[in-house]
Image (cartoon, rainbow, N blue to C red):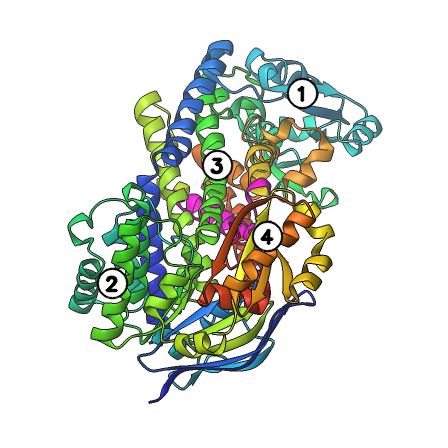
Amino acid sequence: MTNILEVQNLSKSYQKKSAVIDVSFQLRTGESYGLLGPNGAGKSTIINMLAGILAADNGEIFIGGNSVKQDRKKAQMLIGVVPQEIALYSSMSAEANLRFFAKLYGLTGSTLEKAVKENLQLVGLYERRKEPIEKYSGGMKRRINIAAALLHAPRLLIMDEPTVGIDPQSRSHILETIKKLQIEKGVSILYTSHYMEEVEAICDRVGIIDQGRLIQEGTIAELKSKFADISQIKIVPKELELLKKNLSFIQEGLAADAEEYDNGIIIKTLKPNEALPKIMEIFNQIKCEVKTIEILEPNLETIFLSLTGRSLRDD
Amino acid sequence: MIFANSLRIVGEIILFTVNMLAKDKKSLVILLLMPFILIAVLGSALSGVMSGGGFQFEKAHLAIVDEDQSIASNMLIDNGFNNEEVIKLLEAEELSKDEAEKLFAKQKLDGILYLHQGYEESFIFGKKDQVLLKMNPTKAFQADIIKQTLNMDHILGKLAVDSVNAGRALSDFPTVDNFLSEQTLLLEVNKGDVQEVTISAFQYYAVGMGVMYVLFTMFTGIGFVMDERQQGTLYRVKMTGVSSSLYYLSKSLAFMFISILQMLILFISSHLAFGVEFGDYPAWLFLIFVAYSLAISGLMLLLLRWIRNQNTLNVFFSIGVPVIAALGGSMIPVGNFPGFIEPISNLLPNRWAIEALTKVILNRPEEVTSHLVFLFSFALITGVVGIWQLSRREAY
């Protein structure tokens, strides 16, 4: 199977601050790839470089064999980008928006009409095509945002958080659309999201990015098996300061790794059920009341946590 | 092929932008209704307080240097310049040569008329003769008044002052041919003659507001582009393979067309609603609309490089436009400004547009060549520098 996307040793800095450091990955034709990382990890910078909007300091990107550096226009014609914002003219109708972008892509006549109609139908908004975008719900706006990236029938669709802030119904519609694109049209997908369940549902492979570096890569099954021995216990105390003071005491008492995490600590252990009574005993000793306690089974979220010590979402 | 494709894209972006603005009721009200209301308010207010409805320019100050000291020269001074209608426009006083030239150098005079020795003799024998007229090139309106007043048959007959050009250096002013006739001393000025040198308040504010609101249109255009930067539509446009420079050029051209349309609508509606006359040369007016709109589009490209956020735009919109408009003469004619402001005004395209439009309204299109040259050059320079700067900043 050929690669639709090849990223080789990509780096980018802004005013001496590294945003992307030596990132390499490939995307096979028809494959879907999830790029995971918290805000500021470098995902959007990578996407902008793939889209040919931002020049890389170092490294190479090939889309369908075309170098983005040397054959930018050719490469751009092979990709569709769904940006995080609703990048549409809100006072204009969905149809007017799609027609405009289709014309800029160089489509004319019946090809243009067909592309506009098909994509409106694909996202389920053909009946409401005459309405201005500003009258659409959040989910509908997101759907038309996707349609606008598909007008020129790209082979690779890059989606940057395409489901942020929408209702479950619209999310499910979008995920179905993505699956349909992948299965029926063979479109390859590069997907970024904070929602692990979405990534698990859509992506064949995942790359975890943190502080500009790609720190882990593989299929979801591979990652889960690699981190299978890591169970985590997440404890949120009533008094965080008290807990912080006694962190080394807890680590010694449990003989396990304990790390600060948002408003609590994460304890990594192989046998969480055995560790629990001991944890309670130590907390009693230091007179620290527990607000919540949770055992996290290995999933992308816990894998991410264990790799970076941080959660994917800020909330 | 590439050129045709670029042209097609420019056309698409222009059409879409105009269409988008047509749907933006708030902007439409600001750009079309507001100037119309202001023309009505200012035009009516100034017509009401002034006799004859004319715009009261500051009087022109003319010194007469009578080196002849003859009966003929005295009659000309006493009767010619003391006429009631002439006094409304021109303040003429007899001064010695030295005194007149000192005041002229200090810009306290707008012109000097020299009646040389032998003036009477020439007049009696009906000879061709010469007088020297110096005018201050930075006081365009006052220069116009002097020129027009002297041109009246009743004062100096066919005094050829057309070679006195506002753009020439002071030292360069020529001695001009003067064909005096006996009628010269039969002094009776008709009101109609005086009207020719004034422009009505409605005419002036149709021009002034029209020109000022094109500046607002330009900033509306900058606002549109900034929205596109922020909302991500510019990103999406770039994703289609359209280059930054083509996109910015298209946007500025779109707002150029909108500006031309705006001025056309304003002039036509002022004519229909208030009966404002715009002279006998509509094609020249249109040419100036085009030149001015193009100049402002160039300025838009230049400013787009520097205006990167809403706060800066707001400052430009609320302070920059009124100041530029005032300096360019949208509120009161530039001729009424203190001398030190004139050089600043001379750099502004709106000042040149207002002057050119008023000249055409006064049926003197032959005098606007330098104005057109300035406006087209301004458009070219700002446009090229603006595009170059924007492409450099946003280059891949």
Tell me the tag on residue B72: 1
Magenta segment main secondary structure? helix
Residue type, mark 1 in image: Ala
Task: Return the chain for callout 3.
Answer: B
| Percent position of residue A19, x then y | 61, 67
Q: Which mark is residue A176?
A: 2
Q: Is residue B387 visible?
A: no
Instruction: Find residue B248 and report its horizontal and vertical position in percent.
Output: 46, 58
Q: Is residue A134 left or right of residue B118?
A: left
The answer to whether residue B332 is magenta is: no
Question: Please, what is the three-letter code of the amino acid marked with disc 3?
Answer: Val
> Does the CB distance between marks 2 and 3 fall below 8 Å?
no
Residue drawn at 59 percent across, 13 percent down: B83
Is the N terminus of chain A in the top left, top right, bottom left or bottom right quadrant?
bottom left
Q: Chain of mark 4?
A: A
- For residue B286, what is the image quadrant? top left
Measured Cα–Cα span from mark 1 to mark 4: 121 Å
Name the residue beneath numbered marker 3.
Answer: B211
Cα–Cα gap, marks 1 and 2: 101 Å
Q: Residue at the location (30% across, 55% down)?
A: A171
**Residue B267 or residue B217, whichever sits in front:** B217
Mark 1 Cα-neighbour bin, 10 Å: few <14, some 14–19, many ≥20: some
Q: What secondary structure is marked by label 1?
A: helix
Task: Kindly indicate whether the residues beneath marks 4 and 3 are on one polypeptide chain.
Answer: no
* Relative vertical location of residue B267 with respect to residue B55 in this rendering, above or below: below
The magenta segment: B286-311
Between disc 1 and disc 4, the foreground one is 4
Q: Residue at x 32, y 22 (%)?
A: B273
User: What residue does disc 4 label?
Assistant: A280
* Disc 2: CA contacts within 10 A as few (<14), some (14-19) or many (>=20): some
